[in-house]
Amino acid sequence: MKFKREIGKIFLVLIMAIILTGCSSNENVGTKANDPNKNSNEGGTLVIARLSDAENLDQQFMSTINAASVTHHKVYEGLVQRDKNNEIQPMLAEEWKQLNDTTWEFKLKHDVKFHDGTPFNASAVKKTFDRLLDPNVASPRAVVLKMVKEIKVIDEYTVQFILKEPFSPLLSILANHEGGIISPKTIDQYGKEIIQEPNGTGPFKFQSWSPGQEITLVKNTDYWADEPKVNKVVFKVVPEDSTRISMIETGEAHIAEPLPVAVMEQVESSQAMDIYRSEGYGTEYIGFNVTKKPVNDVRVRKAIAHAVEMDSIIKGVFNDVGVKANSLMGSKVFGYDEKLKAYEYNLKEAKKLMAEAGYAKGFEATILTMDSKERVNLAEVLQSQLIGIGIHLKVQVMEYGSFVEKVNSGQSEMFIISWRNATGDADYNQYNLFHTDSQGGAGNTFFYSNQKVDDLINAARKEKDEEKRKEFYAEAQEIEMNDTPYIPVRVIENVAAVAKDVKGFSISPSGYLEINDVAIK
C-alpha cells in the first residue's frame, strides 16, 4: 500500500509538472498572438478621436481635408506625392516627363494591386480620371482638373495626360486627394453615385463606417511597399473636446485632434500625452457671401474689416496659437505675398464707410460657425466688437456637416471657416477660393467673381516661369483684398494631443493626418 501511495505521489507530481509546463508554454504563445505590442513596436489598433465625421468617403466628392485625412495616402494613393520638404516624389508613377506644353507622360509601377485584387495599370488611371471629369457624375472636385482634355493609355504601364492648355501646377494637384486612384470595379459598382466603400492601392483597407460614430481601416497585408506598423485604425467621432482628451488619459484613444487651445494646458501637464504642433499651409478666416445684402456692398465689408481688432482675437481666442494672417495662404505656400497688407483696426474709418453705404444706424446680420469652441468664441468676440459700428450680429452654431452644406449652398451672410491648402501651391488656393468657376462646393463660398482676378489666375496656371507666376498671384491677392470677400484671421497651426506611447505621427502642412509610420509601444 505504501509503495502504491508513493507511486501515486510521483505520478501526481509528473502530471502537475506537465500541466505547469503546458500553462507556461500556452501563456507565451498567447502573449505573442494576442498582444503584439508587448515586446514590439508593431501591431495593435490605433484609435484617433476626432471632432467630426467625414461627409463622405469618395475623394472625388470630398470638400474638406477633414474627410480626406481618412483616406488620403491610407486607402487611396496618387501617381505622385509630396515629401516632408514639399518636393514632388514618385508614388504609383515611377517617373514622368512633360513631352510638350500640353502633354505629360507617366510611367507606372508594376505589380501593384487594388484592395479587391484588381491589377493597377494605365487603364485604371484613365478610368479614375474619366469618372472625375464626367459631367454626368458631377464631381465638385472636377473643376481642379478641368484643363485635362484626355487621359490616354499608351501601354499597360504608360499613361498620358493631354491638356487643353498649359497647366504648370498639374503635379501639385495629382499629389493631393483628388488624384487618388480608384479600383475600376468600385467605379463600375457605384458609377456616378458617391462611393462609400473606398477601394484603392494604399497601406490600409476600408473595413466599416458607422456614420457619426466611427470609421475603421485595417492593414493591407498585400501592400506593394512597406506595410504600416499598426494592424487597425479607428477614427472615432467625439465632438466634446474634454472627452477626446480624457480618452487618451484612460487609454481609450491614442490621438485626439483637433486640439483646442482651451485644453492645451491640461495636455501639457499630463503624464499620458504630449502636444504635437506644426505650421500649416492654410488659414482661418471670416467670409462674406458677397451676393447677400447688406454684405454685398464692399463698403460694408471693408467697414467690418476695419472694426475687427485682430490682435486681441489672436491672443484672447487662440492663445497665440497660429500667427495673424495677411491673406488666405500660409507663408510656406508657393505664391504667398509677404507684402500684402490686411485691414487695420480703425473704428472711425469703419463708421464712415457704414454711413456711406447707408447704414449709419447699423443693421442685423447672422454669422454661421461650426460647433467648435474656438470658432464659437471668435464669433462671440466679433459680436461684441461689431456693436461698435451698429451691427447686431446673431451667432448661429451648427453641426459641422450641416454647416459645410449651408455655406457651400450659399445660405449664409457671414461665416467662419478655414481653407487648408492641400498642394502647397497658390493655384489651389486662388482657383478654388476666388475663381468664378469655383463658386459653391468647389471652394468659392464667397460667391465672388472678378474677371481681372480670373484672368490672373488663368495666366498663372499657364506660366512656366515661377517668378512670373508669383507676380500674377501677388496682383490677384491685392485685388481680392481690396474687394474684401474675406477677413484673414490666422495661419493655421496643426495641433493634436498624442499619447506618449505613440511614435511616428505627424500632420502634413496641408492638414492630412500621417499615420503610416505610427507605432504603438
Image (cartoon, rainbow, N blue to C red):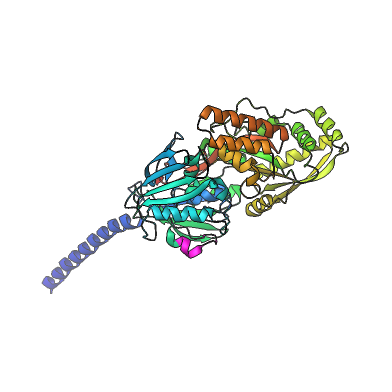
Foreground residue among 520 and 333? 333
| Residue 477, percent from left and from top | 64, 32
Name of the residue lying farthest toward the top: 339
| Residue 312, percent from left and from top | 70, 31
Determine the residue positioned at 13% across, 73% down: 4
Marker count (numbered): 0
**On the rendered structure, is 279 left or right of 225?**
right
- Quarter where residue 293 is shown: top right
Q: Main secondary structure of the magenta part?
A: loop
Foreground residue among 503 and 375? 375
Foreground residue among 448 and 460? 460
Determine the residue positioned at 36% across, 60% down: 117
**On the rendered structure, is 283 left or right of 221?**
right
**Residue 278 position (above or below residue 9):** above
| Residue 457, percent from left and from top | 60, 37
| Residue 488, percent from left and from top | 66, 35
Magenta-colored stretch includes residue 391: no
Foreground residue among 202 and 265? 202
Stretch in magenta: 186-201
Q: In this view of the protein, can residue 267 be seen by the observer?
A: yes
**On the rendered structure, is 370 left or right of 502?**
right
**On the rendered structure, is 68 left or right of 478?**
left
